[in-house]
Image (spheres, rainbow, N blue to C red):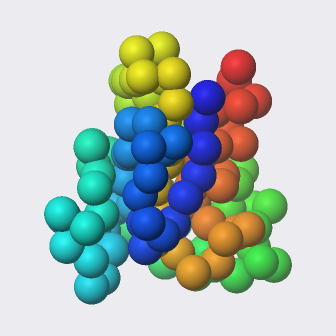
Amino acid sequence: MLKLKRTYDPADSQDGYRVLVDRLWPRGISKEKAKVDLWMKEIAPSDALRKWFGHDPERWMEFQARYGKELQKKGEFIKEIRQLEKKYRTVTLLYSAKEELHNQAVALLAFLNKRG
């Protein structure tokens, strides 16, 4: 099972294996407090795409399409997430964005769910 959670929310045992999927480390949070098992910054959107999107809800659909194209080229990271899911059963994808509906972790989860 894949789940989403903000890095700033407290970790709990239901999170399973915790994977940070942001390119940048979250501001103001220590590694100890974040309790990140793996930082997979390579799966995050390119800097150009991230900056273009800027969490603008009007760009959400186009962002998902562009990010999906980037993810198609990152098969080794998709495969790694799937392997973690098999091993740990629950994998929580962590993100730091304040926007909980329109962020790259939501787009990543949708991409993974679409791919089965």
Taking the spot 38% from the left edge, 45% from the top edge, the residue there is 19
| Viewport quadrant of the C terminus | top right
Q: Position of residue 55 (x, y in %)?
A: 63, 78
Where is 22 relative to 84, above or below? below
Q: Position of residue 48 (x, y in %)?
A: 44, 69
Q: Position of residue 60 (x, y in %)?
A: 75, 67
Q: Nearer the viewer, residue 113 or 89?
A: 89
| Viewport quadrant of the N terminus | top right
Q: Quadrant of residue 34?
A: bottom left
Taking the spot 19% from the left edge, 64% from the top edge, the residue there is 31
Q: Position of residue 86 (x, y in %)?
A: 48, 14
* Callout count: 0
Would residue 108 appear left or right of 81 to someone viewing this image?
Answer: right
Q: Nearer the viewer, residue 26 or 87?
A: 87
Taking the spot 71% from the left edge, 31% from the top edge, the residue there is 113
Where is 33 relative to 29, above or below? above
Residue 66 visible in the shown view: no
Residue 12 visible in the shown view: yes
Taking the spot 65% from the left edge, 55% from the top edge, the residue there is 106
Q: Nearer the viewer, residue 89 or 94?
A: 89
Where is 72 relative to 46, above or below? above
Would residue 100 appear left or right of 32 to someone viewing this image?
Answer: right
